[in-house]
Amino acid sequence: MDDLQNTAEKIRTMEIRGAGRIAVAASAALRDHARTLSSLSIEEFNRRIEEAAKTLVDTRPTAVSLPNAVSLTKRHSAGNVPDAIEEIVKNSENFIRNAEEALDKIGRIGAERIRDGDVIMTHCNSHAAISIIRTAFDQGKDISVIATESRPRRQGLITIRELNDYGIPTTLIVDSAVRLTMKEADLVVVGADSISINGALINKIGTSQLALAAREARRNMIVAAETYKFSPRTLLGEMVEIEDRASEEVIDPGILKELPNVKVKNPAFDVTPAEYIDLIITEAGAFPPAMAYTIIKDYLGLELAV
Ligand code: RUB
């Protein structure tokens, strides 16, 4: 298996996971792949880059960070292969540097919203959300976190380990304890796989129940999202596809075999409507969800939609 196929496989099997990390890994894989194609004609080079881009994008359907990263990396205007490789390498270096800087900026901007003494509920494992929590903690704020387990893949266990290592007091809850526990939280901070043109958030399954419970308890629902998590394609009316994953993640296949009348549904993400979101923290500032169009237009470029 070559390096590109290897990265694609790691994304497909979720060894590399989380919208930000998928995007960075795909951009790096495309950059390295481009370097291996130096002996080709420009036509063949372009064809192989398109093929590689498709291999990466087809690994997981929901996080728009993946096609955005691949599109921003692969575009070049060169008429020969060495120049095309140089452009692609530069694109990738820019993308990866910006992605890293974005996480720091989101941390700083988001931490402004966290007060001393706050209890923050989070879901799944989001580097952008954790950047906010960690920055607030580093500023000396006395905060603690309630982290959901995030069935079925239990990414919450990654979150509690990371928070523990930073020394942040953390309580783990099962997903079904979200509503009961919301009254103990002061606000919710989650990440994003995609944000659509109408400001809806697509994130790990169960995010929308945090949003519902937060609304009911009058707690703020804050989304931490780099601008490359906004979906230009939704501008053309395209819906964000919700990934359906294997039943094995939910129930032992042996048990399922004994239950001929039972099937399993395992959607990996859900949609939280814009009305349930108070603020989206990006590296460019804090925006209400109604500003999604402007973010796509000003920070991503409308040409990514086509
Ligand atoms: C991960 C998930 C995360 C977002 C944001 O889903 O839903 O909340 O991707 O993460 P999965 P980040 O584990 O299925 O990839 O802020 O790290 O990009």
Image: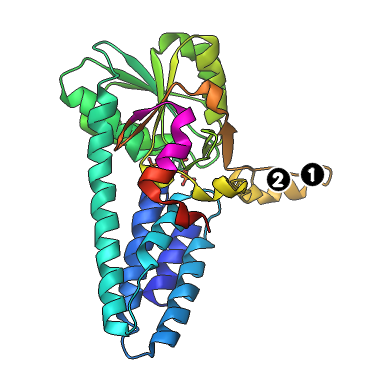
What is the number of the mark on residue 235? none
Which x, y percent locates residue 76?
A: 35, 71
Question: CA gap, disc 2 to disc 1?
Answer: 7 Å
Which x, y percent locates residue 128?
A: 33, 37
Q: Which residue is mark 2?
A: 255
Which x, y percent locates residue 44?
A: 44, 86
- In the rendered view, would you say 82 is above or below 148? below
- In the rendered view, would you say 30 is above or below 110? below
Residue 278 visible within the image? yes
Q: Which region shows up in magenta?
A: 286-296
The reply to whether the magenta stretch includes residue 63 is no
Q: Amino acid at mark 1?
A: Leu
Q: In the figure, residue 141 lies in which quadrant?
A: top left
Kindly identify the residue that appears in the image at 47 percent across and 80 percent down.
47
Q: In the figure, residue 70 lies in which quadrant?
A: bottom left
- In the rendered view, would you say 67 is above or below 38? above
Which x, y percent locates residue 234?
A: 56, 46
Mark 2, secondary structure of its residue: helix
Mark 1, secondary structure of its residue: loop
What is the number of the mark on residue 259? 1
